[in-house]
Amino acid sequence: MRITPCQAALAAAIALNLLLLLCSRSAPGASPRCRRPGGVPGVTVILRDFDGPDHDVAATARSFSSLPGVPVLVVAEASPYPPVPLPAGVAVLSLRPEPHRAPPRPELAVRTRHVALVPDGARAAPGLLRRMRDALEADGDAKVVAAAVGRRRPRCLRLEVDVKKWTVRYGHGERESDWWRSDQNDQRNDQRGNEQNNQRNDRWDDQNDQWRDDQNDQWRDDQNDQWRDDQNDQWREDQNDQWREDQNDQWRDDQNDHNDQWTDDQWRDDQWRDDQNAQRNDRTSDRRRGDHCGALDGAPAVLLLRTRDLFSLPFPLTRPVVTSLSLQASVRGWRLLLLPDAFPASRRPPPSPHEERRARASLDRHRRTLLEQLGIKLEVLPDGRRRWHGCAKDTPRCFGTVRAQTPQYLLQGRWTPPCCLRALRATARHVLARLEEAGVRHWLEGGSLLGAVRLGDIIPWDYDVDVGIYREDVPKCRWLAAVAAAGRPVEDPEGFLWEKAAEGEFFRVHFSRTNRLHVDLWPFYARPGGVMTKDSWLGHPQDVEFPERFLVPLGTVAFVGVRARAPNDPRRFLEFKFGPGVVENPEYPNPQVRRLAQDVGNKNAR
């Protein structure tokens, strides 16, 4: 089929219009100009971390916009209020969706290849943004480059994010401590070198003194020999000459040996000092290049990274910016390079106590929101202290009703939140102590016994604790007896809630009325033939009758920090219920839904 010139022109016009439409949609506003792949050279400054009416955004924007060719973008949930007089050319981007506006797309507002996230109150330093960009491109290990703001240098911390366990662990950075230890070693090495030199000089002085003494003795001997030559015969003179020659040969040999030893010592000392100087120079060079960190703490900092890396993150502009980027970078294996350079800080009057409390409350609020978005329930600080961000006595548990023996978090590639495990341990210890005090015969059951044998603890993905009891012993426990008599839940003085389960003939002890993490108490009784059975079966494969001989007598195992009652042969009991090899081959409760192999060895499993 032939194409006429008119048809070809029409096709070209349609293609051009489609290209212009695509370009206009990929750029902010209605600009039809296409964006260059990867962005244009340069650095865009983003001001994100500021709060309240006492911010310094206008002066910070004015300082950085004075740098030639550096665009400045103010990003906030809403436009700063009260309104601030921003310099010409500084754009404001609101992240809060509005029904009458297009969805916010901050990645379309940045055209440069690099972006710098600048905290409130920083001031521009000529050439420092360029040096940070050059350091980023030169360092193959770092994805983010940081520089302090003000005289105070941030602490360089190690950081590990365990998504599967909802946990963040911080550690003291090694670079600064290594540098301090290196300085101490240098001082000790210098002292050692001085001591060796002094010892060598002392030995040489001793040798010189010995040589002078020998020379004086030799001179006196010569005088005496001369006198004896005049007095004695030739035979005595010959004997003296021979003796002197032997003494001189020995002295020369000793001196040569000493000189050889001194030369060897000098060579080794020179080599040792050269090595020490080379190592010191290497450390000084590394120090000038900066420290590789996982996170920063204790002081504000400017962060610079590639624009494509920033907007590849799920929460690119979430506050606090440094914490947010550090956590997301750690999950991806990114490194942060902290330079020794610093940006000036604005001179502002010290805040009042009220302003400090308000700023601290705002920071804590943003931090809690960030950790909730990232699914972090526990922070382990460098000094070992723990900050909990999950459930407690007065809050609901972190997950809803469990279906098909598979909590929702397992489908996300996560295990039981650490706050929930902490509450389960506390509930288990409380229940086991009350049963022991009352003389109720009891033992760990099912997955709880499996966790005790494997780990001495709750299985990391388990969501409750199972305990078997003798049904005839129920009246011995005042709380179980009260539940059976009243037919309603009973709360003990420690705030644990005892109740009869709605699903069958067994009891349940909750962490609290609000937090429904629980221990299940299963009443068993012996039927004829010495077989333990019960009245409620929930259809779990391991939920079977078993010989009473496993319970006569009862044994103990370590569990949640205490000694808990257990069958007298836990391994055989578990293999009777679960099958051979159950201790060595862990698996999720319902492998048809999700298997353990999908998550083991992957801290960031999804």
Image (tube, rainbow, N blue to C red):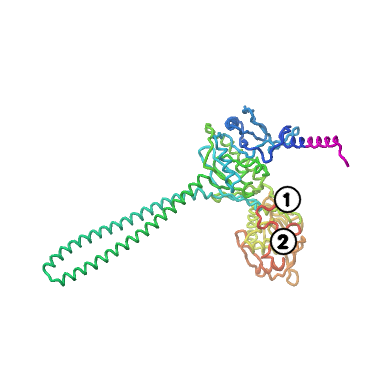
Q: Which residues are magenta?
A: 1-18
Asked whether the residues under the numbered discs 2 and 1 touch, taking CB atoms below 8 Å apart as contact, a structural biologist would say no
Q: Residue 64: percent from the left, percent from the top?
A: 58, 33
Q: Nearer the viewer, residue 74 or 570?
A: 74
Q: Characterize the local packing of mark 1: few (<14), some (14-19) or many (20 or more) Cα atoms within 10 angstroms.
A: few
Is residue 55 something that shows in the picture?
no
Can you tell which quarter of the image residue 270 is in?
Answer: bottom left
Q: Residue 306: percent from the left, percent from the top?
A: 63, 42
Which residue is tagged 2? 522
Q: Earlier in the sequence, mark 2 or mark 1?
A: 1
**Res. 458 mark:** none
Q: Nearer the viewer, residue 91 or 576?
A: 91
Q: Residue 284: percent from the left, percent from the top?
A: 48, 47
**Does the magenta segment cover residue 15?**
yes
Q: CA distance from mark 2 to mark 1?
A: 22 Å
For badge 2, the amino acid type reads: Trp
Against 528, residue 259 (above or below) is above
For badge 1, the amino acid type reads: Gly
Q: Nearer the viewer, residue 207 or 572?
A: 207
Horizontal arrangement in the rendering, residue 207 relative to residue 41 (left or right): left
Horizontal arrangement in the rendering, residue 563 relative to residue 248 (left or right): right
